[in-house]
């Protein structure tokens, strides 16, 4: 039996893309120049103690995922422009929703491409302008619906992702 060699999965192997196009004609552009993009799963728990047991039982009944973000604003960056417009114009409701596709380059698919998940998120602003070197924004992308597991391909310089039609 052949020994399987372990391989470290780098943070840069999980790449986020934002739809800067439309629902009808999506354009998933790489989310560049972010200094933070961390995930919090925020599981929702149902805990109870039964009368015949000394301890509690816990089940996970849902999730409320969010991605913390921070970035240095760059001009001519369509992803930054979309987020900044939401924050600066204090958009609400559907106007504050973005679609993010996370491509996992460490998980290839036999038919070609990579495993990916896309989901809508509400942009929840936290702060901006708190650095003296560059204009920065921070906040959270909070889930606004379920994720969809898809297969994605990347262009040559990995700046654009495309969802493969099955």
Image (tube, rainbow, N blue to C red):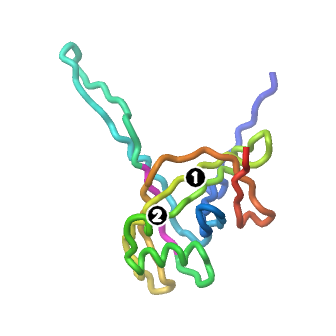
Q: Nearer the viewer, residue 40 or 131?
A: 40
Please report contact status of discs 1 and 2: CB closer than 8 Å, yes or no. Answer: no
Mark 1 Cα shell of 10 Å, populated few (<14), some (14-19), many (≥20): many
Relative to residue 2, is residue 107 depicted above or below? below
The answer to which of marks 1 and 2 sits earlier in the sequence is 2
Query: Farthest top residue?
Result: 52
3D distance between C-alphas at marks 1 and 2: 13 Å
Q: Nearer the viewer, residue 91 or 33?
A: 91
Magenta stretch, residue numbers:
65-71
Left or right of 165? Residue 85 is left
Q: Secondary structure at mark 1?
A: strand
Residue 67: x and y in percent read 47, 57
The residue under the point 75% across, 58% down is: 154
Q: Determine if the magenta segment contains residue 66.
A: yes
Q: Nearer the viewer, residue 68 or 113?
A: 113
Q: Determine if the magenta segment contains residue 43.
A: no
The residue under the point 51% across, 84% down is: 134
Residue 164: x and y in percent read 73, 50
Quarter-of-image position of residue 21: bottom right
Q: Secondary structure at mark 2?
A: strand
Left or right of 45? Residue 162 is right
Query: Farthest left residue?
Result: 51
Mark 2 Cα shell of 10 Å, populated few (<14), some (14-19), many (≥20): many
Residue to which mark 1 is pinned: 118
Left or right of 75? Residue 128 is left
Query: Farthest bottom residue?
Result: 132
Residue to which mark 2 is pinned: 97
């Amino acid at each position: 039996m052949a020994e399987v060699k372990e391989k470290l999965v780098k943070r840069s192997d999980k790449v986020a893309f934002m739809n800067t196009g439309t629902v009808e004609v999506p354009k998933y552009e790489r989310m560049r120049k972010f200094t933070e993009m961390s995930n919090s799963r925020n599981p929702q728990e149902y805990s109870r103690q039964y009368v015949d047991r000394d301890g509690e039982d816990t089940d996970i009944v849902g999730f409320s995922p969010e991605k913390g973000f921070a970035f240095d604003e760059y001009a001519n960056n369509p992803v930054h422009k979309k987020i900044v417009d939401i924050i600066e114009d204090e958009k609400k409701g559907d106007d504050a929703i973005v679609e993010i596709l996370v491509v996992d380059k460490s998980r290839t698919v036999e038919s070609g491409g990579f495993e990916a998940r896309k989901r809508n998120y509400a942009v929840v602003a936290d702060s901006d302008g708190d650095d003296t070197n560059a204009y920065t924004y921070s906040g959270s992308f909070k889930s606004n619906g379920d994720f969809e597991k898809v297969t994605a391909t990347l262009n040559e310089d990995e700046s654009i992702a495309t969802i493969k039609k099955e």
